Amino acid sequence: MPESGFGLFFGLLRRDALLLYRRRSETLAPLWFALIVATAFPLALGPESAKLARIAGGVVWVIFLLSSLLSLDSLFRSDVEDGAFDVMLASRRSLTVVVAAKMLLNWLSTALPLILLAPVLAYSYDLDQGAQQVLVVSLLLGTPLVCMFGALAAALTAQLRRGGVLLSLIVLPLTLPVLIFGAGAVEAVLTGGSARQPLLFLAAGAVVSISFGPWLIAETLKTG
């Protein structure tokens, strides 16, 4: 990335981070949602530790998928509606760099807090230390791919007035394999198996999403 690209990247990152801080009640909504849902499952299922441990991986992953939807609708919409993207294209700024900055900030504001919270949630579900570590690794590897699918859906629906429902219908089927492999990695450890294969799949998805995701989404915004 040329020097001007770095300047654009960090400038956008700083600008959007400031906007998120100003709307911090909205920014924190996914985290509060995650905490509420995570608390609801043990209350509904009772104190049986074996049952809670079996579902812990799937619960944490479902919580992340659902909470991430709360912030996706506004990912590109404001810049599309106020013409900011058109100005960037007219000034020959790299839209790929713009998208990369927005994707990174989206990951930092939605995925990273849950990853940091995951050990606490896992402990409350009585997961052993090995399963807790696998859960955190699966989230680190799998969340970039989920964020890429979410950003792609946000780009496809950015010009629709009420695209929230359509966005969810696009994102959820695409992210099901990530959910299956993420929860499957934890399940494999709990049953005495190896989490290597599902984690390798998630790692491959992370490489693809980081390498090609910003370009693909930028092209989607251009053609949209």
Image: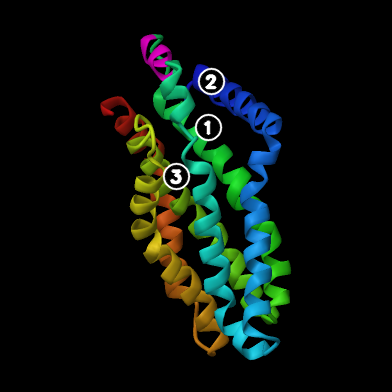
Amino acid, disc 1 = Ala
Amino acid, disc 2 = Leu
Judging depth in this view, the residue of 92 and 125 nearest the camera is 125
> Which numbered disc covers residue 73?
none
Quadrant containing the C terminus in the rendered view: top left
Report which quarter residue 53 is drawn in: bottom right
Report which quarter residue 71 is drawn in: top right
N-terminal label among 1 and 3: 1
Q: Residue at x 45, y 66 (%)?
A: 179
Question: Label 3 neighbourhood size at 10 Å, few (<14), some (14-19), many (20+)?
Answer: some
Q: Residue at x 37, y 43 (%)?
A: 153
Q: Which residue lies under the disc numbered 1? A: 101
Which stretch did the figure color magenta? Answer: 85-90
Q: Residue at x 49, y 51 (%)?
A: 144
> Which numbered disc covers residue 8?
2
Q: Is residue 194 magenta?
A: no
Secondary structure, mark 3, is helix
Provide residue 138's location: percent of width, then percent of height: 54, 65
